[in-house]
Amino acid sequence: MSRFERVRGRLRRAYESGRESVRSGRSAPADVPEEARVASPASPGPAAPRSATVVGAEPPAAMHTSTSSRDDEDVPHALRIAAAWSWRLIVIGVVTWAVLKIVGTISIVIIPLAVALLLSALLAPAVGWLLRARFPRSLATAVVLVGGLAAVVGTLTLVVNEFIQGVPELSDKSSQGVRQIQNWLKTGPLHLSDGQLERYIDEAQAWVNGNTEKFTSGALATASTLAEVLTGTVLVLFATFFFLRDGNNIWRFLVRLLPVAARWKVDDAGRASWATLGAYVRATVLVAFIDAVGIGIFLVIFDVPFAFPLAALVFLGAFIPIVGAALSGVVAVLVALVDSGPVTALIILGAVIGVQQVEGHILQPLIMGRAVAIHPLAVIIGIAAGVVLAGITGALVAVPLIAVLNTAVRRLAARTVPDTPPDAVVVASHAP
């Protein structure tokens, strides 16, 4: 047994000596001078450590932190920045185009929902008043919605009735105006003869007869559009009701879909945007009402027909900032020109311009304030884009959409931390 122990000890010592020789072979020999350890192009010598200095070779060029390879380093910095901006803008453009295509495809749903949001922002304070008066939420929402619908239907009924009653008188006035224009063409600087007038009238009649098919197809398209309008109206009513009743719950559900780190920031931006939308809609209604009353007073004073329908048209047109009330005022001027002559038309034109100046320089800054202040250039561009994308509805929605996005972007870009909600539960990992 002792002999076996001695054999095993010898084998172990041999194994240890072998391992030591392998280790010494891997390391540099101790007697090698320092110069021999440094590699050079002429005599490479033994492998040098990473910190060794290479004699006779140029140091490698430092790579920029934004490059990932030596090929990128050879491209000029300005060109790399331009390329980076270009592909990012291309991606943004493609995504925007896809979003617009989707919105255009389901516009019959998107547009009623947008109108419902505007109506909800307008009627939300009334629902709040009824809730503070201890009304049930569903009952308060129904009362406000039915009351608002009754006010709209009653106003439209008055406008249509007055318009129907005044059409015969306006038709006679228009005929007289046409005869005056014919007399002016004969006796004025143009000196047109009866034959020339008849020829122009015949050409206009031929153009109408040649485009009858287009008018008919347009009427058929109008019938389908009427069905879409009825469907959209029903969707607006239902969406407005549920936005007013369950809007807060719907918003909380949408916020919970986001990552936890982004919820408070998005919630703060969304609630600020909703406050901006409500302020914008209520201020626009007030400004439109003042415009309609101001122009309507002048129409009544100078006995212009359709004073109430024209005032209602001015009220509706004022929802399109800058251009809406001006276009509706032009209609009032034309009616005054046909009915009462050029002097009254010029007075109505002066009244329209004066009301527009008061609105732009006093009412808009005073009522809307800085919360929804938007540069006029942004307003014009937004209205033009809205008309191109969605017609009249796009023009109505464009400016409030810009105001909401302006507030949301400002809140999201702010560095301040939103206030903690009063009903928030703070969970700590350890006891304080």
Image (cartoon, rainbow, N blue to C red):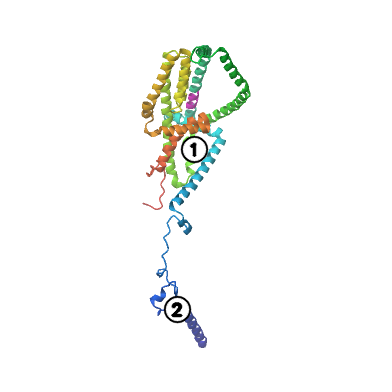
The tag earlier along the polypeptide, 2 or 1, is 2
Q: In the rendered image of this protein, does residue 30 appear above or below residue 265?
A: below
Q: Is residue 121 highlighted in magenta?
A: no
**Residue at 56%, 15% in the rendered image:** 196
Q: Secondary structure at mark 1?
A: helix
The residue where tag 1 is placed is 250
As drawn, which residue projects farthest toward the bottom?
Answer: 3
Residue 406: tell me if it is visible: yes
Q: Quadrant of residue 211?
A: top right
**Residue 1 percent location from the top left of the image:** 52, 87
Measure the alpha-carbon separation of dots 2 and 1: 74 Å
Q: How many marks?
A: 2
**Amino acid identity at mark 1:** Ile
The residue where tag 2 is placed is 24
| Magenta-drawn stretch, dominant element (helix, strand or loop) | helix
Camera-nearest residue between 166 and 249: 166
**Residue 2 percent location from the top left of the image:** 50, 87
Rate crowding at label 1 as few (under 14), some (14 to 19) or many (20 or more) other CA atoms within 10 Å.
few
Magenta stretch, residue numbers: 143-149
**Residue at 43%, 51% in the rendered image:** 78
Residue 134: tell me if it is visible: no
